[in-house]
Amino acid sequence: MGHYPYMTLRLHNIARCLTAITALALVTLAFAHPEDDFCSPGDDSIDPALCAALAELNSSEGKKTKSVVPSVLDESGNERSIVATAVLYVSIGIRHIVPDGYDHILFVLAIFLASVRFRDLLVQVSAFTVAHTVTLALAASGVITPSPAVVEPLIALTIGFVAVENLFFKNMTPWRPAVVFAFGLIHGMGFAGFFGELGLPPGQFWSALVSFNVGVEIGQLIVIVAASALGLALRHALNDPTGTRQYRRFVVLPGSALIGVIGFWWAVERIIP
């Protein structure tokens, strides 16, 4: 009879893990159209320019509705100052990741699931940040002109690749930082595609670009902090502080498999409209 309490505890822990994995799958779909919640008619508490930026979301058919943000003027019709522009574009950058950036969120989560140690996570996130910052600047300034028809499917494929690699390797591979850096270059082109559709204030291009990128990094940090808190809680619940046994079995493997399926499915959708 002595093993029944142990089995009950184990079942409870498995149930917690399954719940967490389900939440992980649904978090990217939680706010399908946040502009509906925060930008309702007559609501003047949200910057109209930010509301217009939130309209740049995937529709249920997978198509995007393009809108131009009136960034040159504020809600009073006056020209925005550098500080006001910076605040606006930081907000837009954050929103572009949380909650709007489903594909970028899944890529960061795939990186997180592959990181048993904090150092591994830091190396990969740093490589991703440097890479997407470079191509964001190059593409937004017109030095390179990548085609969205090519970039968007590639972004989805990067998600699937990293997630599948998690299934075969318990620890960060020697080539993973280089792979993440290369994939970060692709994601930066995606950021630039969104940034290029915004109404850009004349004479404030670089301040807007830097502010947007800062917002992207803040959004990325929010995802990492939330995932880390959940990951630590699950490791504790599973009595697996190293994250290499039950945590990998019940969290990393199912989570990576789910992310991989979503990534490859998006790739097919973006290649075959």
Image: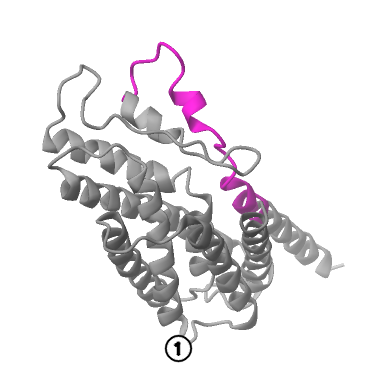
Specify the quadrant of the image occupied by residue 132: bottom left
What x and y, as percent, mark residue 45?
A: 33, 19
42 magenta-colored: yes
In this view, 128 is above or below 174: above
Percent position of residue 197, x then y: 37, 42
Q: Is residue 138 magenta?
A: no
Rendered position, 112 above or below 220: below
Residue at image location 77% in from the left, 60% down from the top: 11
Residue 252 locus on image (x, y percent): 61, 69
**Segment colored magenta:** 20-47
Disc 1 marks a residue whose amino acid type is Pro
- Taking the spot 39% from the left edge, 35% from the top edge, the residue there is 53
| Residue 234 visible in the displayed image | yes
Residue at 14% in and 26% down: 79
Observer-nearest residue: 174 or 113? Answer: 174
Q: Residue furthest top?
A: 42
Could you tell me residue 198's position as x and y percent?
33, 40
Is the residue marked by circle 1 packed among few (<14), some (14-19), or many (20+) residues within 10 Å? few
For the point 26% across and 59% down, which residue is it?
Answer: 137
Q: Nearer the viewer, residue 185 or 102?
A: 185
Q: How is the image coloured?
A: one colour
In the picture of the structure, the residue carrying the numbered disc 1 is: 174
Q: Secondary structure at mark 1?
A: loop
Eyeballing the image, is 97 above or below 164? Answer: above
In the shown orientation, is residue 194 left or right of residue 234? left
